[in-house]
Image (cartoon, helix red, strand yellow):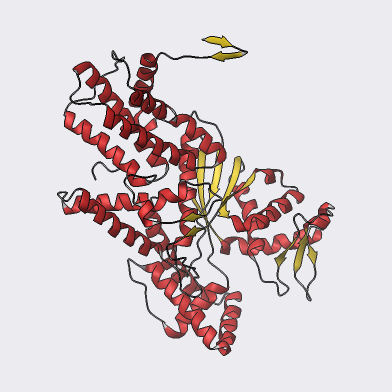
Amino acid sequence: IEAVKGYLNFYFDPAVYSRRVLDTVLEQGDRFGQGEPKGQRVMVEFSQPNTHKAFHVGHLRNVILGEAVCRILETAGYEVVRANYIGDIGLHVIKWLWNYMKYHAGEEPPAEDKTRWMGDLYAEATRRLDEHPELEAEVRALFARWDAREPEVVALWEKTRQWSLEGFEQIYRLLDVHFDRVYFESEVEEPGKELVERMIEIGIATDERPEGPVVVHLDQLLGLEKETYRSYVVLRSDGTSLYATKDLPLAILKFQEYPDLAQSIYVIDVRQSLYLKQIFKTLELMGYEWADRLHHLAYEIVNLPGNVTMSSREGTVVLLDDLVREARARARAVVEEKNPHLDETLKGKVAFAVAMGAIKYPMLARENTKIVTFDWEQALDFEGVAAPYIQYAHVRANSILRKANFAVPEGLTPSHDLHPTEVELISRIAALPGAVQRAAEEYKPLHIANLAYEMARAFNDFYNQCPVLTAEPAVRDFRLRLVAAARQAIANALRLLAIPAPEVM
């Protein structure tokens, strides 16, 4: 320790420091990077697809970001409740049911491609209605039957909703995602209408029916001259619900079920920022003390090659299945080129691991509120800032340990002068626990994504500069421990991002 101009400078003995880092990593294994339990519960709501529509890549960043944030929070020491909020009612559902009853009665979706089939029927419904506006009367009539909860309509809704949910589950399994609590718009619609009436009674909402809707004039309620929260509608003039009708009671329901939530996080498109501020401020004005524990985790869109504009209504969406299929095909071609002697089954597994990394990493390695422009060459780059580069470092480490063909030596203090690349690699490995805490505090997986790349780069520099298996025994044994620690730390970082760490490539 040295005092210089009012600062304390700490110097570490590289040999002692390196032993402590490597011992910690190898003793903790998969637990390396975990923080102490915080004693706090956090809910993260993400995904939020609509039933009776396609699940397309426009939904993808939400799911990938939400799952990574959950994993990081859990590793940082929080208890996490993963929540999904599914849009299972509304005009889009009625249009789908109308089209199905009129043109597809009795049909069932294919077992492995349910969401594509559901999306095709929805796009078909909108096309028919655009081409024949007179058919809108039939849709309105069906909506009235739904509002009256006619058993035939409700039964068909339940059956077809289940098809969508099964399709979503296939997608979540593919992405290695799960949920603890799934909320539905249908379960909060009626409570929402009742809540609106109470808001009118206590002066939070203004009832302008029948000429107009029910409105919350937030700036007026808060006495703000400068336009800040503006006004928003909570119920249409005809008594039908909007998103706000359901989002208000949903927030209340979450805290009824989980009253000890330290944070209730909403992973939602940045374009909904004002709307969510309106919802949160309304709940605060209504006296809910937990309103300051609501947090909007905003994210930007993903631009696909060719500037594709996606619309479920028009059927111009790029389905997640199609993106994964293309990623697998491209990844397999790269794997074939790099390792043509792998058996076919293993090639398929490796291609899937590389494909998942190629899709997920670009969406996690940028600021949440920065647009991601997806590029296949960058996403599958084995030499750039991309998941395959990180995965390949893990494979290289695994290959060295496999070739050593004996157990990793027990704790060793290095007897040689550490090479700068060894020092750098140890430093990057040691940074993982701190990066986990920072990523959890800021809800930013990019800190883990960046560190994973830095570890891989440091490992590759070490790999190119420092012989391992051919070094003298004492140096070899220390470096084998370093390789094992690097492999473990890289695998742990990838796991936080829900990206596979393949053993071979």
Q: Is residue 146 visible?
A: yes
Q: Answer left or right for 61 relative to 471.
A: right
Q: Answer left or right for 421 relative to 333.
A: right
| Residue at image location 38% in from the left, 68% down from the top | 114
Q: Position of residue 34 (x, y in %)?
A: 44, 31
| Residue at image location 38% in from the left, 34% down from the top | 455
Q: Answer left or right for 212 relative to 329.
A: right
Q: Is residue 27 visible?
A: no
Q: Answer left or right for 309 relative to 198.
A: left
Q: Quadrant of residue 400?
A: top left
Identify whether 38 is placed above or below 356.
Answer: above
| Residue at image location 41% in from the left, 26% down from the top | 427
Q: Position of residue 24 (x, y in %)?
A: 37, 23
The single residue placed furthest to the top in the displayed view is 2
Closer-to-camera residue (316/377): 377
Identify whether 476 is placed above or below 204.
Answer: above
Identify whether 128 is placed above or below 306.
Answer: below
| Residue at image location 35% in from the left, 18% down from the top | 19
Closer-to-camera residue (253/23): 23
Question: In what quadrant of the picture does the C terminus appear?
Answer: top left
Q: Position of residue 326 (x, y in %)?
A: 33, 61
Count the labels in the image: 0
Q: Position of residue 252 (x, y in %)?
A: 65, 51
Closer-to-camera residue (415/295): 415
